[in-house]
Image (spheres, rainbow, N blue to C red):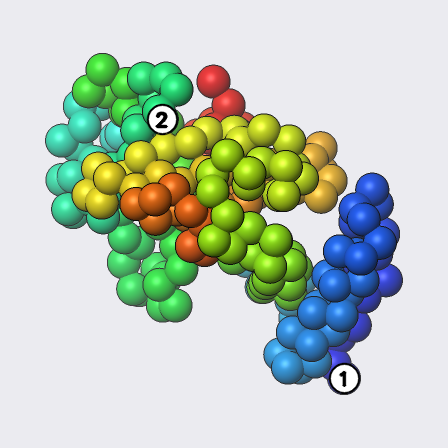
Amino acid sequence: MRCNHTMNLFARCAGVSSLRLLTYAFLTVLVVNAAGCTAAVGAGIKLIGSAVDDADVKARKEQLMNADLAKADEMFGKPLDAFSDINSKRAWRSYRVPKNKDPFGKDRYVVEVAKGRIVAVSRVEKNSDLKIDLPRAIAIKSDVMGKPISECEALVDHGKPLVTVRSESTGLLTQLYEGRLIKNLQKPHYIVLSFDGQERCTNVHFLGVGASTRKDPLSE
């Protein structure tokens, strides 16, 4: 039997404009029907994934916290990229999760660095809740694609960006916004906007935090 979460989506989206709410619901139905999943299976997979992420981060915490940054490179390999907050001295490095731990290639280890020392370790996943994240990303993308960074904050309609970071490898900007529908009941979840060299939006996706040494990795 195929799962139908349309009513749950309406309940979660309280406060969202009627047009966007209908868009979320319509797109969610399409995604859910295409997946042909069941609610029980989805819940089971989430619980297993969360337990795996928690155990993974916990196992690495003792070796990495307050260690020199080189320790992360030693453990995870060459970083995929490094990011610096344009409004503060905060910085992060991202690393690939091995295929035996992440067969779909959606996960990343993210290490926060301060003065060359590791101060937080997280495991994150792109579009971690497909039946919710994809419809929301499509709806937001329809508003912000091609728009300058100065206009995107109002169009995303989720408050000010939590951070705006610059990639060390490309020099391009990325903004992360609060993405939780029910903040106090969900793990950290972010809306991610990518920009080109002219600081116009080129893509939107969501980033879910599976586990972290910090309650919210983007909190100070």
- Work out which quarter of the rendered image holds the N terminus and state it: bottom right
Where does residue 103 sit, x and y in percent of width and height? 36, 68
Does residue 41 appear to the left or right of 53 in the view shown? right
Q: Which residue is at a point 69% across and 77% down the rendered structure image?
A: 30
Where does residue 123 sit, x and y in percent of width and height? 41, 44
Does residue 149 appear to the left or right of 62 in the view shown? right
**Front residue of 11 and 40:** 11
Residue on which the image places disc 1: 1
**Front residue of 119 and 130:** 130
Comparing marks 1 and 2, which lies closer to the viewer?
A: 2
SS of the residue under disc 1? loop
**Amino acid type of disc 1?**
Met
Q: Which residue is at a point 39% across and 20% down the rendered structure image?
A: 87
Residue on which the image places disc 2: 85
Q: From where the camera sits, is residue 177 visible?
A: no
Any mark on residue 44, and which? none
Q: Which residue is at a point 27% across and 58% down the rendered structure image?
A: 98
